[in-house]
Image (cartoon, grey):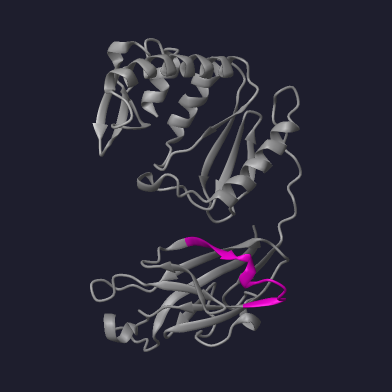
Amino acid sequence: MRNLLRGLKAGFANIADPNHIRISPENGEYMVKLTKYDFTYHAHVKTSEMTPEALHRQQCRTVGFLAQKLIDDLRHPAKILVFRQNESLLAGDLIDLRIALSAYGSSILLLVQAACTGHPPGTVEVADDRMMVGYVRRLADRESVPDLDFDSWMRMLRRAHALWSHASDGRLVRQAAEPTRRTELTFGAEGNAGASLGYGWSGPEAGHQWAVDERSLITVEVPGSADEYWLEMDVLPFVRPPLLPRQRLDVIVGGTLVRSFAALPRGEVSCVLPGHLLADRPTVDIVLHHPHAASPMLVASEADDRRLAVSFRRLALVCA
């Protein structure tokens, strides 16, 4: 991000200077480094296909063309600018990026993030009149960049384009949110989850309920037909280090393991349920496998002899 900001503020001056372009062979292919702004990328050329000198001449022309094309696009906004990175984005960096872009023109920015609780894959939200935030199932790992989740990317991009197409005078307009099709269950003495619980649950307590023993069953009303569903859970795993440092939670639907949380975190967690597992069914049985359930009496010398695994506060099934 910092290198990108330097380049934007300088108008990418001298980025295509031959003295600032380095060609280096790695693992049978060429890598290109633009030393002026510390950018590195794959040339997608094998070392057997071209000499480094010829590739250097080609890249000098290509980089200059692409830099000027980007500047022209920024000055004459007719496209959505898409930004994503695997690392967490600091609020200050996002502000600096938007300031740098605004120096060229009134571009629309689409910030892409991994789906999380409250933001299912494929959804898009208008942050303000110049920025949208889109959510995909997952961001591709840097070690396997082509391994992106194509379906949720395409759903998200289509929704972003529709919002952009309805922009007024180049400004995004907040539209009435589509009604979310969801089934929401809350746990505890005041919750509504009681009738949905099968085996593997303790009695309700104030604001929560424990999943106990090795497996728990919950039956959830399917909120409608969808290609995939988004399962949200607000949880507190039972841990007592050093004897019990973590809890594992497996989510199983129709005998299919759809997600395994090897070390379940505290708070809100989410996962995708493939639509075909819930197709044409009014309800779905979700089995929660938690093999590290343990008694507080044994691991912490407490008075409770139940085999506790995970405390649930909320669970929601959402049409993505």
The residue closer to the viewer here, 167 or 211, is 167
The residue closer to the viewer here, 81 or 296, is 81
Q: How many marks?
A: 0
| 309 magenta-colored | no
Q: Does residue 82 sit above or below 12 in this rendering?
A: below
Residue 293, x across and y down, in percent = 37, 81
Q: Is residue 16 left or right of residue 69?
A: left
Q: Does residue 301 sit above or below 252 in this rendering?
A: below
Q: Is residue 157 left or right of residue 173?
A: left
Residue 104, x across and y down, in percent = 55, 15
Q: Does residue 237 sit above or below 61 in this rendering?
A: below
The quadrant where residue 171 appears: top right
The residue closer to the viewer here, 299 or 46, is 46
Q: From the image, which quarter does the C terminus lie in? A: bottom right
Residue occupying image coordinates x 58% and y 86%: 198
The quadrant where residue 239 appears: bottom left
Residue occupying image coordinates x 63% and y 66%: 275
Q: Is residue 40 left or right of residue 230?
A: left
Residue 48, x across and y down, in percent = 29, 32
Residue occupying image coordinates x 52% and y 25%: 98
Q: Is residue 281 left or right of residue 132?
A: right
Q: Which residues are magenta?
A: 268-284
Residue 304, x across and y down, in percent = 37, 86
Q: Does residue 233 sit above or below 290 in this rendering?
A: above
- Single out the residue that lies furthest toward the left: 242
Residue occupying image coordinates x 33% and y 82%: 296
| 283 magenta-colored | yes
